Image (cartoon, rainbow, N blue to C red):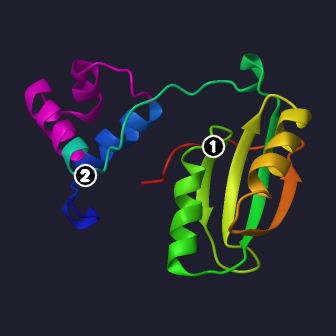
Amino acid sequence: MLRAELDAIDLRILRELQRDGRMTNVELSERVGISAPPCLRRVRKLEESGIIEGYHAMLSAPKLGFDLVAFCMIGLKHQSEANLKAFAAATEGWPMVRQAWMVNGDSDFLLHCVAENLTRFQDFVIEVLTANEHVHTVRTMLTIRQVKKVPLLEI
């Protein structure tokens, strides 16, 4: 399903589900102004098409003991397709890496990391990142505080 195929009701459904993914189908249908059965069919179609990728709870990392958030800019030794794919695949096995992007510019990858503390993060950088056979440079940025958190797409 392409964006061009989304009508106003589909967009309202997506907006409402971004705000509260736990609401019942009946509540969702009331909010978007259609009855429950067609609302459920639309939601299922949005899920099957991959527009709705899933549902999750937003957790407070600090309250769960994860006090450090950092970004790592990774430069690879060689930017061959095989090396890029190998490094990307390696990130899947690193729980501390919560999100990873292949980027252009001075770095090849940008990693969003969450750790319990500075010692655990430093161990990861030294023992895992710099030890990776494809990695040439690792530049890290420790965050001070998050000033904006908007997990919603503006649609």
Q: Residue at x 73, y 38 (%)?
A: 114
Q: Is residue 100 above or below residue 151?
A: below
The image's mark for residue 137 is none
- Which callout, 1 or 2, points at the residue further toward the start of the chain? 2
**Which residues, given as a range, are shown in magenta?**
20-46
Q: Which residue is mark 1?
A: 94
Q: Residue at x 28, y 27 (%)?
A: 28
Compare residues 56 and 98 and report the one nearer the observer: 98
Magenta span includes 88: no
Going by the numbered disc 2, the residue's amino acid type is: Ala
Compare residues 29 and 5 and report the one nearer the observer: 5
Magenta span includes 21: yes
Label 1 element class = loop
Q: Which mark is in front, 1 or 2?
A: 1
Q: Is residue 42 visible?
A: yes
Going by the numbered disc 1, the residue's amino acid type is: Trp
Q: Position of residue 136 (x, y in %)?
A: 78, 71
**Mark 2 surroundings: few (<14), some (14-19) or many (≥20) residues within 10 A:** few
Most prominent secondary structure in the magenta stretch? helix
Q: Is residue 37 left or right of residue 20?
A: left
Q: Residue at x 85, y 56 (%)?
A: 140
**Mark 1 in CB contact with mark 2 (< 8 angstroms):** no
Q: Which residue is mark 2?
A: 8
Q: Is residue 145 visible?
A: no
